[in-house]
Image (tube, rainbow, N blue to C red):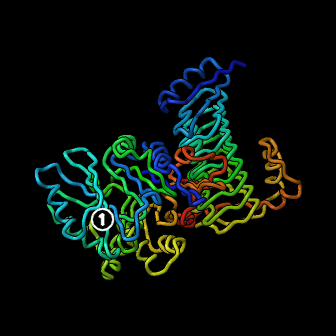
Amino acid sequence: MREIEIDANSMVPRDLNRAVKQAAKEYDRIIIKNPNAMHYMVAGLTDNTEIVIDGSAGYFAGTMIDGAKIHITGNAGWFPADNMTDGEVIIDGAAGDGVGQGIYGGTVVVRRNVGSRTGEIMKNGTIIIGGNSGFMSGLFMMGGRIIILGDISDDAGESIIRGTIYVLGNIKSLGKNAKIEEIDEDDKRELQELLPSYGFELDNEKYNNFKKIVPRSKRPFYGSKESEEG
Amino acid sequence: MCGIAGVVFKDRKLHPVGDIMTRMLDALQHRGPDSAGFSIYGGLGLAEHEYLLNIEVKERSGLLEQVKEAVNSVTPIKKEEIIPSVENYNIYRCKIALNSFDELKPLIMDIDKIEDVIVLNGSHSFEMIKDVGSVKEIADRYDTYSKMGTHAIGHTRFSTESIVDRYHAHPFQSYITPDITVVHNGQITNYWKIRDPLERKGHIFETNNDTECIVHYIADKLHEGYKLEEALEQSVKDMDGPYSYIVGTPNGVGIAKDQLGLRPGVLAENDEVFAIASEEVSLRAVMDTHDIDQISPGETRAYTI
């Protein structure tokens, strides 16, 4: 494996992203030292490169990536992995609002608490939150799955259209068009396969405690007739 | 956008908070290029009933003498300095004494009547520094690096609601209760609904700026006997719009965030320091940010010493 370190100290995001994209053509692993919570790190990378951000990231870390695997060893600000289409963003610390906003695919993992609007307008992919998730998580969710191992706050699944939010902790309140269902054996199997692969080891019994938030109607805004069209 | 920050040292001792707040705001420079400002509490060391006035004076022959005469006609100037600013303006800073806090606002209004002169603030327990330009330019101009204090709030401004000048730079101050200041990121959309009852009670608004509305609202609540935490909680129920704001008082700082959580706010705390800001990058200027909290929609936090 070919590996390179880039020191982000005294760099602006444009310079750093240019250096990362250039290095991604030649190296399998890029370590960004001294990130200092810089915004927009690793924006738009389309190579399947492993990136380690050695510290905290600011806003929009890993926005619009397709295939890259990003590991942030500190915290992240608002909208990490925004609109990613494929790849992986793993955050060891906490993160801000809008984790995984609008993602089309790939996996986002935050090991500790996150802010509000997790997974808003996501279309597909997976978001795993090790701690609590805030207000309006799953806002206008259109597909994919969000898994919350802690509590989920007010108006969970607000105006959810498709997709599933799995919650292990408490659900403070539901948003419009959201309802709670018990998980079935398929759900349980899916979670049992997925969570340990990201280092979340739960007692087998705990999987029975998951609840899932799903849409009441696929057409919440356009009448009651069930249809996938329009 | 705007960037906001606040820091409190829990031991109530003097620390280089001017330097710390400069670094916190410089890290938020990208959130607003228009102006920046500081309220640095606890380091002025004024005697009871002494006040510091910061007065913007245009460079015009005889104008400064007119200002001094207006001040001296009410109370003798004890100490003075002139800080050069930009666009042919200087900041005239003087120390005065009054019989009571109630005399401060009328004196300021008298001085404001002089053409090309605006009193930026009058304070007892904090030093306000605000000007147009970048954080570093202002820090160099006013030597914020050397300012000592127990706590501070600060702002870097991206103007959306009103003109860019020294007066409209944050912090804003209210004279309803002594030494209350606010820095703000966002908009208050039910501005007139908040302002109207305050004006009916006799509170004087100098601008149509929504930040001034917040500071009067909080000062009014504190005047009515609310604790800072209670005033912040009530404000989130009463105020609409996307906002987060930080309040500075003689005893601490607090933050409030709108109920939809449309503006950012993060917090980090250890045994020595309580710090809040728009973004983690600002907190990193003062402490280890391994454990940071997001301020949730509709949430308030405060720390008083």
Return the residue nearer the eye: B49 or B296.
Answer: B49
Return the residue nearer the eye: B131 or B266.
Answer: B131
Question: Measured from the top left, where is residue A57 in percent x and y?
Answer: 58, 40
| Residue type at numbered disc 1 | Ile
Question: Measured from the top left, where is residue B235 in percent x and y?
Answer: 47, 72
Question: Measured from the top left, where is residue A2 in percent x and y?
Answer: 69, 18
Q: SS at mark 1?
A: strand
In this image, A136 relative to B146: left or right? right
* One can see residue B122 in this view: yes
Q: Callout 1: 10 Å neighbours few (<14), some, many (20+)?
A: many
Quadrant of residue A64 in the image? top right
Q: Which residue is located at x 11 percent, y 54 percent? A: B62
Relative to A72, say whether A160 is above or below: below
Return the residue nearer the eye: B62 or B217.
Answer: B62
In this image, A196 relative to A99: left or right? right
- Image quadrant where one finds the N terminus of chain A: top right
- Taking the view exactly as shown, the residue that stands out farthest to the right is A204
Identify the subunit bearing mark 1: B
Q: Which residue is located at x 75 percent, y 62 percent? A: A169
In this image, B56 relative to A68: left or right? left
In this image, B150 relative to A166: left or right? left
- Taking the view exactly as shown, the residue that stands out farthest to the left is B61
Relative to B108, say whether B139 is above or below: above
Q: Which residue is located at x 73 percent, y 65 percent? A: A170
In the picture of the structure, the residue carrying the numbered disc 1 is B96
